[in-house]
Amino acid sequence: MPYPVYADGQPASALGGENFAIFESSDNVGCAWDFIAYTQDPSRIVDFYVDLGYLPSRADIAESDAASVWTDDPLMAVFVQEVANARPRGPIENWAGVSEAIQDMLQEALSGQVPPEQAIRTAQQKIDAILAE
């Protein structure tokens, strides 16, 4: 079943959660870049993802023959298909606060604690306040 979308809209899902970061103050920037390049090399990337329990976040990997490690599993295949609709989260300094507001909204609406419209309005107010900081 496809995700519901607005009229004439495109489906979207969130991409991310696992990130590499290199601190500007690091004494080992070159080594860090070498490690990232090593893990993302096409000859290694599938093993890297599988060993860590990740799904492919790159469309070229998700659409390759190597993706059979995920697509042969009907429970995982749907997630691989969503890579085509996935978008990375924006660079928000307080992403944890935004994520918490979204989680609270879903919990309140799905558990029936408040009507969905109210949960959405409350989440929007919380997120607007976070983004205004």
Image (cartoon, rainbow, N blue to C red):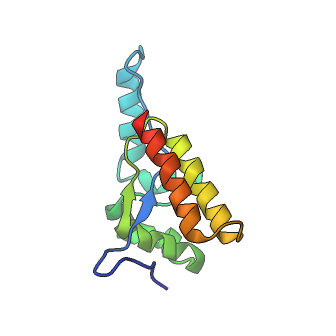
Residue located 50% across and 70% down the image: 79
Residue farthest toward the left in the current orientation of the protein: 8
**Image coords of residue 23 (percent x, y):** 42, 23
Q: Is residue 24 above or below residue 109?
A: above
Instruction: Give the residue drawn at x 63%, y 55%.
Output: 104
Res 124 seen here = yes
- Is 130 placed above or below 32 here? below
Residue furthest to the bottom: 1
Q: Residue at x 39, y 77 (%)?
A: 5
Tell whether 78 sits left or right of 91.
right
Q: Taking 18 as reference, is 56 above or below it?
A: below
Quadrant assignment for the C terminus? top left
The residue lying at 41 percent from left, 37 percent from top is 132
**Position in image of residue 66 (x %, y %):** 42, 67
Front in this rendered view, residue 93 or 52? 93
Q: Is residue 50 visible?
A: no
The part of the image, by quadrant, that contains residue 54 is bottom right
Q: Nearer the viewer, residue 105 or 72?
A: 105
Front residue of this view, candidates 108 and 9: 108
Tally of numbered discs: 0
Looking at the picture, tell me which residue is in the foreground, 8 or 114.
114
Q: Position of residue 93 (x, y in %)?
A: 44, 35
